[in-house]
Image (cartoon, helix red, strand yellow):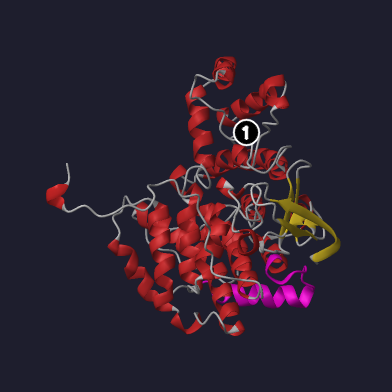
């Protein structure tokens, strides 16, 4: 619960006018206090300047908490390592959506409800044909998810709680189908329909890699690894794509449009495309012998080369998600018979050398979740062009939960950031024939 601490406040004084304003401090359930500046512009005729919103809280949220200095990530209060170790994706999705882990009956009903929504409208099958075969998967995903509002317009009344629930379940259930079909379309292979007797991650892998030619059995090890990866990416507080979903939703846009907006934001290489960049970097390094050369380049401020997968905007400690993936990777590679995968061995050695170098330790440039996820995806046979689409699949539940939370927040307003205007002041129009 968030509460106002009426005994604590910050007094702001404008030295040029002598006017003062007392700004109350708000206290969350955990984390630093927050200064409430809502009265700032109205009372003082000034507003804050915070590029990238590094020191600005845009909303109240009870979904995810991150302590970047301590390397802590909680969903509804539950540590990410416990959720990834003991839970499954739909159990975590339920908690993210509803606030608590489900009991046996609640979980069974939720799994059944989501599973029964996993098919997509058959006409969406033909919608894919409007794209070139070599389209980027994220371009296709943006288009198909945005167009789903035209197929499921019976659940886009954002003021109806039942509509919001149905749309939420539909998006969580259908995203694996759409992502898998995006891959199949690019490969020129037939679409594989979902199977209700398979688990969430297992079903996704089946739709990705099965063909009508022969029976395909999903490895339990790979299904568990994929499920764990989905858990690790399910939500991550007010990142760029989540903020985009909330901003789009604040205008009253339908849920499919909001999630499509989130997908578009996630497409950026600084956000969802980072694990692709890690693989590209490892390929560039090529061998363990060349690691010192690239370490030196990363430390050279005049060299544009950077160690991808190290450091994080929020985490100033080891990313807890990276710790889990570091342990998951060897299981996947052993199952696939590629435990000597050169890129994994290169990544492990790069991490060891970097974390023994004071330059990286002092700057708290620890490996993040992207450092290992790309290697695991590659070992599974998933092309790099699909990596960000899988990120979108996992993050859908977080986007949906944040969107729902925003719509039920009594303080919710349409997003409208201010700006520090640096253009020309007011001036008079000069007729064309009088301009020099």
Which span of residues is magenta-colored? 96-118
155 vs 380: above or below: below
Q: Name the residue tied to disc 1.
A: 310
Which residue is drawn at the image coordinates 64% and 57% (left, top)? 235
105 vs 280: above or below: below
Is residue 214 in view from this perspective? no
Q: Residue furthest front?
A: 17
Viewer-side residue, 65 vs 356 = 65
Viewer-side residue, 277 vs 420 = 420
Q: Position of residue 60 (x, y in %)?
A: 70, 64
Q: Along the horizontal axis of the image, is 404 left or right of 253?
A: right
- Quadrant holding the N terminus: bottom right
Which residue is drawn at the image coordinates 43% and 72% (left, top)? 148
Q: Picture quarter containing residue 181? A: bottom left
Q: Picture quarter containing residue 130? A: bottom left
Count of residue discs:
1
Which residue is drawn at the image coordinates 59% and 55% (left, top)? 46
Is residue 232 in view from this perspective? yes
Viewer-side residue, 239 vs 382 = 239
260 vs 373: above or below: below
Question: Is residue 283 covered in magenta?
Answer: no
Q: Position of residue 21 (x, y in %)?
A: 72, 58
Which residue is drawn at the image coordinates 39% and 50% (left, top)? 425
- Quadrant holding the C terminus: top left
Q: Secondary structure at mark 1?
A: loop
Main SS category, magenta section: helix
């Amino acid at each position: 619960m968030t509460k106002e601490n009426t005994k604590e406040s910050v007094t702001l004084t404008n030295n040029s006018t002598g006017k003062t304003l007392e700004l109350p401090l708000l206290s969350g359930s955990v984390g630093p206090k927050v200064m409430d500046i809502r009265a700032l512009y109205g009372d003082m005729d000034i507003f804050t300047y915070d590029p990238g919103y590094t020191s600005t809280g845009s909303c109240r949220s009870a979904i995810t908490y991150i302590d970047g200095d301590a390397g802590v990530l909680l969903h509804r209060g539950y540590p990410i390592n416990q959720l990834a170790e003991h839970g499954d994706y739909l159990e975590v999705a339920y908690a993210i959506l509803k606030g608590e882990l489900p009991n046996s009956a609640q979980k069974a009903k939720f799994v059944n409800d989501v599973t029964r929504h996993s098919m997509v409208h058959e006409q969406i099958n033909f919608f894919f044909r409007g794209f070139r075969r070599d389209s980027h998967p994220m371009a296709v995903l943006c288009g198909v998810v945005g167009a789903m509002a035209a197929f499921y317009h019976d659940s886009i009344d954002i003021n109806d709680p039942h509509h919001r629930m149905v749309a939420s379940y539909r998006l969580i259930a259908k995203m694996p189908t759409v992502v898998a079909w995006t891959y199949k379309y690019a490969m020129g292979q037939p679409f594989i329909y979902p199977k209700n007797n398979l688990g969430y991650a297992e079903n996704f892998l089946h739709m990705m890699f099965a063909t009508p030619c022969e029976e395909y059995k999903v490895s339990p090890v790979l299904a568990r690894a994929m499920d764990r990866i989905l858990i690790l990416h399910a939500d991550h507080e007010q990142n760029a794509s989540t903020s985009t979903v909330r901003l789009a939703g604040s205008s009253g846009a339908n849920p499919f449009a909001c999630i499509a907006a989130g997908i578009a934001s996630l497409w950026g290489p600084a956000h969802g495309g980072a694990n692709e960049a890690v693989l590209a970097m490892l390929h560039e390094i090529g061998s363990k012998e060349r690691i010192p050369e690239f370490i030196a380049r990363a430390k050279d401020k005049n060299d544009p080369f950077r160690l991808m997968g190290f450091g994080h905007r929020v985490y100033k400690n080891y990313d807890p998600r990276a710790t889990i993936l570091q342990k998951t990777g060897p299981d996947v590679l052993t199952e696939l018979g590629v435990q000597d995968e050169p890129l994994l061995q290169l990544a492990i050695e790069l991490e060891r050398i970097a974390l023994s170098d004071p330059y990286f330790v002092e700057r708290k440039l620890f490996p993040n979740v992207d450092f290992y996820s790309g290697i695991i995806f590659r070992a599974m046979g998933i092309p790099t062009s699909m990596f960000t689409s899988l990120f979108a699949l996992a993050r859908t539940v977080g986007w949906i939960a944040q969107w729902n939370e925003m719509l039920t927040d009594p303080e919710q307003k349409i997003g409208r950031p201010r700006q520090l205007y640096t253009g020309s002041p007011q001036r008079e129009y000069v007729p064309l024939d009088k301009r020099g």
